[in-house]
Image (spheres, grey):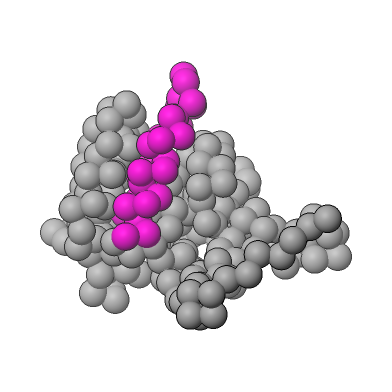
Amino acid sequence: MSHALKLDPELASRLVTAQRLEERRGQRSSGLPALDALLGGGWPRGALSELSGRRSSGRTSVMLAALARAARAGEATALVDTGGALDPRAAAACGVPLPRLLWIRCAPAQALKAADLVVNAGGFDVLALDLGDARPRAPIPTAAWVRLKHGAERQGTSVLVLTPARAVGAFAAAAVELSAAAPRFFPAAGQGGPPLLDGARVKIECVRRAGRRATDNPEEHHASCAWLAFTCRS
């Protein structure tokens, strides 16, 4: 026989459901309308989000869009870079104000500690943690993700973790996977001229988002996918 747990009415009135907590936190725009639509508004505040994909899948471009959008909103941003993927000229072209970006370059073994220190120092609204393209030789300890998650919750920081393959697991409130980019070319100029690269088209899939899990229902699967186009002119 099961017994229902009865709470004191005053205590019960102070409890907040997980769904209501997500609603209070809100979200920050990713800077990409198609991605915002998949995420239900953007990257969640006060939480970890994971952006995974192989090399040349558009991870860095999505990250720069988020940092640029946060900077335009007057928010403080930081980047922990383990793979040296940041090209300052490309970042500036995407709208990231470099003098206002805290850029930390470190070894992969120091990445989680560096991110944890920055988040818990307070004052940063968005932090991107780029773990590079190499898969870690050993799994990242669960305790490291727990500390970073709790720090993000306390400070209200949106932490975006970039990985070559999913690694954050259930500690991520949102998770997006990018497929390999398909190149697009201009038509050849004149007869026999070589085609010129126009950009790339990338499929994005939301496998987890704040407030819900991605559905396994084939009828709803289309709502969890979208396409991004990156051009050489942008």
Q: Choose between 76 and 138: the one closer to the eye.
A: 138
Residue 225 at x, y = what percent?
A: 68, 61
Magenta segment: does it hold 69? no
Residue 107 screen position, x and y as percent: 28, 28
Q: Residue at x 43, y 30 (%)?
A: 141
Describe residue 31's horizontal placement relative to residue 37 as left or right.
Answer: left
User: Which residues make up the magenta segment?
Assistant: 126-154
What residue is rendered at 56% in x and 46% in y? Answer: 170
Note whether 109 is above or below 131 in the view shown. Answer: above
Q: Is residue 227 above or below residue 83?
A: below
| Residue 92 in sight in this render | no
Task: Report the residue at 57% width, 71% height from top.
Answer: 7
Q: Nearer the viewer, residue 113 or 62?
A: 113
Image position, residue 23 (x, y; %): 51, 75
Q: Please say if 41 is above or below 190.
A: below
Residue 139 in the magenta stretch? The answer is yes
Q: Quadrant of the C terminus?
A: bottom left
Q: Is residue 213 left or right of residue 125?
A: right
